[in-house]
Image: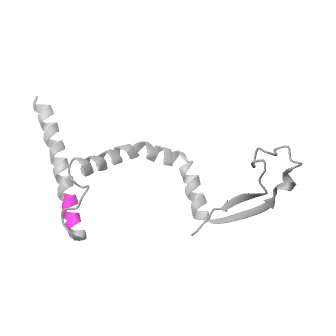
């Protein structure tokens, strides 16, 4: 599913009688282009969804997810894979998430004990 771009070229002489002359093109140019993007149905549906209240609600929660991903990447070493292959990366990711969760649980236990 692809967007189409239609590009129109026309002579600036036709703009001489327009009240917007000099605003929509630079004075002294010989031709003007006008680009029109025709969006696919899927793209239009996505744009409509992004303008909905449901999308705004989800985007408010996004920072929490990004915050956890950043923590795993920068503090726990998920920035670089320690082994080759998908299986190795899966094991590294799972163990990193386990360790991060265990540290969080230990911190909560220490807060309650203090």
| Residue 74: x %, y % from top left | 25, 48
Query: What predominant SS class does the magenta segment belong to?
Result: helix
Q: Quadrant of residue 63?
A: top left
Q: Quadrant of the N terminus?
A: bottom right
| Residue 67: x %, y % from top left | 32, 44
Could you tell me which residue is drawn at 79 percent across and 57 percent down? 30
Foreground residue, 111 or 15? 15
Could you tell me which residue is drawn at 15 percent across and 47 percent down? 102
Instruction: Say if the magenta span includes residue 1.
Output: no
Left or right side of 43 for 19: right
Could you tell me which residue is drawn at 19 percent across and 48 percent down? 101
Left or right side of 97 for 63: right
Q: How is the image coloured?
A: one colour
Foreground residue, 31 or 114? 31
Left or right side of 84 for 3: right
| Residue 92: x %, y % from top left | 19, 61
Please count the marks in the image: 0
Q: Quadrant of the C terminus?
A: top left
Please provide the residue range marked out in magenta.
Answer: 88-94
Foreground residue, 75 or 100? 75
Foreground residue, 92 or 35? 35
Residue that extends furthest to the left in the rendered view of this protein: 113
Q: Quadrant of residue 81?
A: bottom left
Residue that extends furthest to the front in the rendered view of this protein: 28
| Residue 11: x %, y % from top left | 82, 59
Q: Is residue 114 above or below residue 55?
A: above
Q: Is residue 41 above or below residue 57?
A: below
Q: Is residue 76 above or below residue 35?
A: above
């Amino acid at each position: 599913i692809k967007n189409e771009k239609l590009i129109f070229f026309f002579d600036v002489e036709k703009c001489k009688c327009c009240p917007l002359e000099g605003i929509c093109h630079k004075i002294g140019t010989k031709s003007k282009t006008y680009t029109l993007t025709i969006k696919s149905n899927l793209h239009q549906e996505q744009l409509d969804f992004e303008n909905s209240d449901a999308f705004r609600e989800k985007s408010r929660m996004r920072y929490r997810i990004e915050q956890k991903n950043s923590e795993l990447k920068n503090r726990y070493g998920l920035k670089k894979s320690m082994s080759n292959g998908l299986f190795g990366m899966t094991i590294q990711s799972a163990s990193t998430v386990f360790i991060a969760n265990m540290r969080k649980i230990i911190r909560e236990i220490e807060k309650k004990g203090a």
